Image: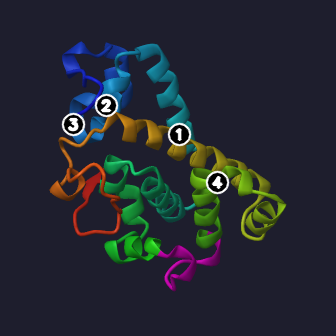
């Protein structure tokens, strides 16, 4: 059961509903915004930021989705691990590729750029002070300064809001594997996932 009350759509600020196209989305697609709707003006700012990250993205959708899923594992955000976004699927993310995230640095189906970005995201989620000059030098082998800034902002979004979502414990609409014992460490590499737009 979620730890913060999910607001029903008729309780949402109308502009927030329009900004998120909430009326045409499923409860899972409305996601954490059902809780954020308690603070509509702040939520609108978050939507604008997240929208800018996506609209002005120069990084490949595949790379972003792989980084997101690996961070979701470290965050233990059940909804983040269960979701597969359409743009990632359209970019070639399948469950075999997701399974390679179990040991990404040894995966044969990940590019060197993807491995470096995933490592950066892992460190950001687990030991941010280990991100040193060497890590940034490795990033520069594959990404421009602008892309590194984009990656870092995207990773910060995934780590921060993924951890917040994990504490909210939104599991009601998730596949059974993600509703299981709270103490068990879960992974995004499994048979049960949900595709959202």
User: Residue at label 3?
Assistant: 27
> Is 111 on the left-hand or right-hand side of 66?
right
| N-terminal-most mark, 4 or 3 | 3
User: Residue at label 2?
Assistant: 21
* Residue at 30 percent of width and 25 percent of height: 4
Magenta-span inclusion, residue 164: no
In this rendering, does residue 57 appear at all? no
* Residue at 39 percent of width and 26 percent of height: 19
* Whole-number angstrom distance, CA of label 3 to CA of label 1: 22 Å
Question: Badge 3: few (under 14), some or many (20 or more) residues near its Cα, within 10 Å?
Answer: some
| N-terminal-most mark, 2 or 1 | 2
x and y percent of residue 90 in the render? 38, 64
Question: Is label 3 or label 2 in front?
Answer: 3
Question: Badge 1: few (under 14), some or many (20 or more) residues near its Cα, within 10 Å?
Answer: few
Q: Which picture quadrant has residue 137? A: bottom right
**Up-down: is 160 above or below 151?**
above
User: Residue at label 4?
Assistant: 127
* Whole-number angstrom distance, CA of label 2 to CA of label 1: 24 Å
Q: Which picture quadrant has residue 39? A: top left
Question: Is label 2 or label 1 in front?
Answer: 1
Question: Is label 1 or label 4 in front?
Answer: 4
Q: Which mark is residue 160?
A: 1
């Amino acid at each position: 059961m979620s730890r913060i009350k999910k607001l029903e759509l008729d309780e949402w600020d109308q502009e927030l509903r329009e900004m998120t196209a909430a009326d045409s989305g499923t409860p899972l697609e409305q996601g954490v915004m059902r809780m954020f709707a308690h603070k509509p003006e702040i939520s609108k700012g978050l939507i604008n930021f997240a929208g800018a990250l996506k609209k002005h993205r120069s990084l490949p959708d595949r790379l972003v989705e792989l980084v997101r899923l690996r961070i979701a594992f470290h965050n233990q955000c059940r909804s983040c691990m269960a979701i597969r976004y359409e743009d990632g699927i359209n970019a070639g993310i399948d469950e075999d590729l997701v399974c390679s995230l179990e040991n990404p640095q040894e995966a044969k189906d990940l590019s060197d750029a993807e491995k470096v970005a995933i490592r950066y995201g892992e460190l950001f989620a687990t030991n941010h002070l280990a991100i040193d000059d060497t890590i940034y030098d490795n990033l520069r082998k594959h990404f421009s300064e602008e892309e590194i800034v984009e990656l870092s902002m995207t990773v910060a979004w995934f780590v921060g809001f993924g951890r917040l979502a994990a504490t909210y414990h939104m599991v009601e609409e998730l596949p059974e594997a993600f509703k299981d014992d709270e103490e068990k460490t879960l992974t995004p590499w499994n048979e049960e996932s949900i595709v959202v737009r």
